[in-house]
Amino acid sequence: MKRNSALFLQVAIVLFGVGALAFLLGEPHVEGRNAHATLFEIYFKDPFLAYVYVGSIPFFVALHRAFGVCGSVRQSGAFSPETLAGLQAIRRCAITIVGFVVGAVVIILAFGDKEDRPPGIVMSFLVAMGASAVAIVAAKLARKIKAGLA
């Protein structure tokens, strides 16, 4: 991988992370039922929102590890055992995200309004498919790196 490509990926990862953080912090204020709520009502009276914030931690850990993998590749110009460890951590984070999404679906089905269930499940499915794709790609890339290092 070229150094410029790794630098571009690092910049893209940072921009993606900042955008995701802005969405997580800004979206609850414009949501239908929270449009006229106070900050206390938004953040402290909605346990599902707290669950989403805790569930986003593996996402940001994976972004941090991806930034590190790209930095390691940019410095050495090749894959190393550090990149292998980073890819394995990214795979574990993606699997953890899928677990949080399954928990969110259970919460939506058990406690959600009947009108909120279909879009919530569809969005959960899309997030789970994206996280599954990341886990598969990270596992395959780690397997190729492991074979190349041996």
Image (cartoon, helix red, strand yellow):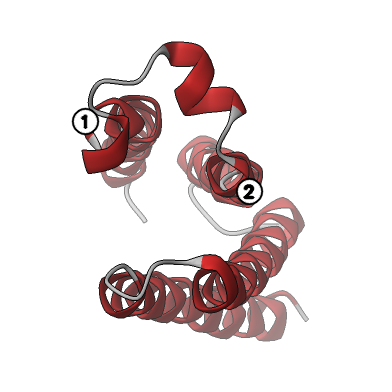
Q: Is residue 134 above or below residue 29?
A: below
Of the 4 image quadrants, the one containing the N terminus is bottom left
Residue 51: mark: 2
* Label 1 Cα crowd, 10 Å radius (few <14 / some 14-19 / many 20+): few
Q: What residue is drawn where x is 51% and y is 78%?
A: 109
Q: CA distance from mark 2 to mark 1?
A: 19 Å
State the image coordinates of residue 104 (x, y, percent, origin top left): 56, 67
Q: Is 58 situated above or below 115?
A: above
Quarter in which the C terminus is drawn: bottom right
| Image spot of residue 145 (x, y percent) | 62, 75
The one of 118 and 138 positioned closer to us in this rendering: 118
Residue 6 % position (x, y) = 36, 43
The amino acid pointed to by label 1 is: Val
Which label is found at residue 14?
Answer: none
How many marks the image carries: the answer is 2
For the residue marked with disc 2, what is the amino acid?
A: Tyr
Quadrant of the image occupied by residue 21: top left
Tell me the SS state at disc 2. helix
The residue that appears at 26% across and 72% down in the rendered structure is: 119
Q: Which residue is at a point 29% across and 80% down the rendered structure image?
A: 118
Circle 2/circle 1 CB separation < 8 Å: no
Residue at image mark 1: 30
User: Which structural element holds mark 1?
Assistant: helix
**34 horizontally vs 46: left or right:** left
- Asked if residue 27 can be seen in this view, the reply is yes
Q: Earlier in the sequence, mark 2 or mark 1?
A: 1
Residue 48: x and y in percent read 57, 49
- Residue at image point 39% right, 35% down: 24
Residue 4 in view (yes/no):
no
